[in-house]
Image (cartoon, rainbow, N blue to C red):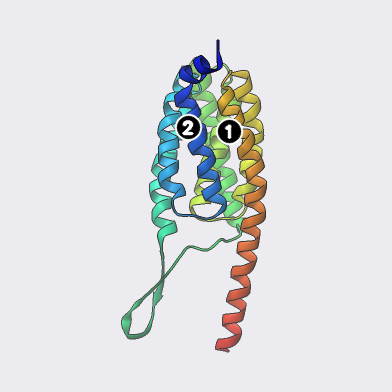
Amino acid sequence: MSLSGWIEHNWIEIFGAVTGIIYVFLEIRQNLWLWPIGIITSAVYIWVFFHGKLYADMSLQGYYLAISIIGWYWWRRKEQGSGGAGERVIEELKVTRISFRLSMILAGVFVVLYTSMFFILREFTDSPVPGFDAFLTSLSIVATWMLARKIFEHWYLWIIVNSAACGLFIYRGLYPTVILYAVYCLMSFAGLKEWRKSFTRDQQQVHTTGSEIS
């Protein structure tokens, strides 16, 4: 098959890969536009994963559509109480670190999701890789929720997911998606670095403001 023929045959997947890269770039920059781009990417990959028989990953894209709407709202503004004369004080959601309690809750959520998805995929679908598919999907669900709440440690989960996904998509012959997830993996390290800077900067501002008030 010629290059032009291959592109014509895979243009939907290629389009999804391009929007996916734009999505991660906006995520690193903490740009609000990541959410509408994420909606487009998810819609494309529902189709891609259905045809690739990766049913858990296809279902995950439906979850991404829903969490993108919620994340869009959470990132847009967060109520911080009342200011003078009864006015509401609104500011953007800040990057935070995960607490031990929340990390245990999310670990439990992951185990429940993985166990449920593995059983469903193994017993009721023709998925050739039920364990792998369930693992990536479950971990991605947790990571995306953490992203919507701007929790710094979600980048560690994306590094694991993106690295493992490259192997899965090579196995399934989804080569444009392999390139996408390889880029995702590299960009995850960049995101980790940028969000750490953002968190440190926010904490310094809080301490400076607190010192000025006192």
Given the image, on which type of amino acid does mark 2 rest?
A: Gly
Q: Secondary structure at mark 2?
A: helix
Percent position (x, y) of residue 134?
55, 29
**Which residue corresponds to the image point at 60% horizontal and 39% vertical from the top-left?**
184
Dot 2 or dot 1: first in sequence order is 2
Residue 67 drawn above or below residue 43: below
**Which residue corresponds to the image point at 57% horizontal and 38% vertical from the top-left?**
139
**Which residue corresponds to the image point at 48% horizontal and 38% vertical from the top-left?**
19
Q: Residue furthest top?
A: 1
Q: Residue furthest left?
A: 86
Residue pointed to by mark 1: 180
Percent position (x, y) of residue 31?
49, 54
**How many residues crowd around disc 2 within 10 Å: few (fewer than 14), some, or many (20 or more)?**
many
Residue pointed to by mark 2: 16
Percent position (x, y) of residue 115?
55, 31
Check if mark 2's residue and mark 1's residue have beta carbons within 8 Å.
yes
Q: Secondary structure at mark 1?
A: helix
Q: Residue furthest bottom?
A: 214
Tell me the quarter of the picture where residue 66 sits: top left
**Which residue corresponds to the image point at 61% horizontal and 63% vertical from the top-left?**
199
Between 15 and 211, the one lying in front of the other is 15
Q: CA distance from mark 2 to mark 1?
A: 9 Å
Circle on res. 40 = none
